[in-house]
Amino acid sequence: MTYLDLPRPTVFAHRGSSAHAPENTLAAFQLALTQGAPALELDAMLTADGQVVVIHDDTVDRTTNGTGQVPRMPLAAIKEVDAGSYFDPAFKGEQIPTLAEVFETVGRRIFINIEIKNYASPLDSLPSSITTLVQKFNLAEYVLFSSFNPLALLKIRRLLPQVPCGLLIFHGSGGGWARGWLGRRFPCQALHPDLRDVTPAFVASTHQSGRRMHVYTVNQPDEMKHLFDLGVDGIFTDDPPLALGLLK
């Protein structure tokens, strides 16, 4: 499914089906696919030896049985930790995947939003490493790039201008510029705001500027219904079956 083919509203499985499986693992991504989610969201960052891995935090501490900062760990060390047992013993042995492994497993079978997480090192090679993998697996039509880092999006647009980008927007005053006229002028195809900042006027101005609005992170049924009624183009949720059930 390509960006233009995505249903509206699109249900993005946030870090995979992370209410039902350990986040950002192959198990969570495969489950999202099985549950019928048309799209998933994942987080990408670099290891010490320049490999692109899929994990949200800068450290492995919260979601594995190990400790350490991802940018200071080589891939071999990252592959040694257990990324499943913290969630449920049934997922013991689940690994932190590389982006290449995700592409091999679910690429072309589900649309993928890749968040570029180089916030601690905004000028690193993560954007170019990701685009190299997207090109290697011929997935330019099946991915969307997003980031809170505008520099990363500008860089990735230069490398793969045909791939859509979504500007992630901080909640509150920190994201004020992106919700205003500067955000409407930023060269991207979508805005990704915090659900607490979404208003009818914001939805309307986003659509008037020719952009889609995908809202994070939406897990309560009443919030989902409210946003669907406002006409947003998608939501990021930890619980894809819940959102898909409401849409039906």
Image (cartoon, rainbow, N blue to C red):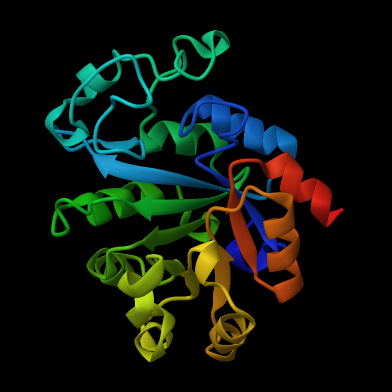
Residue 173 versus residue 95 in the image, above or below? below
Residue 64 versus residue 28 in the image, above or below? above
Q: How many marks?
A: 0
Q: Position of residue 27 (x, y in %)?
A: 55, 25
Q: Nearer the viewer, residue 230 or 136?
A: 230
Q: Residue furthest right?
A: 248
Left or right side of 2 for 159: left
Q: Nearer the viewer, residue 182 or 41?
A: 182
Left or right side of 73 for 52: right
Residue 126 versus residue 198 in the image, above or below? above
Q: Quadrant of residue 59?
A: top left
Residue at the image point whose x is 55% and y is 38% from the top: 16
Q: Position of residue 62 (x, y in %)?
A: 34, 27
Residue 85 versus residue 125 in the image, above or below? above
**Quarter of the image containing the N terminus?**
bottom right
Q: Nearer the viewer, residue 81 or 160?
A: 81
Is residue 27 something that shows in the picture?
A: yes
Q: Quadrant of residue 210?
A: bottom right
Residue at the image point whose x is 60% and y is 36% from the top: 17
Q: Position of residue 205 (x, y in %)?
A: 55, 88
Residue at the image point whose x is 31% and y is 15% from the top: 81
Left or right side of 125 for 35: right
Residue at the image point whose x is 28% and y is 70% from the top: 150
Q: Position of residue 153 (x, y in %)?
A: 31, 67
Is residue 8 something that shows in the picture?
A: no
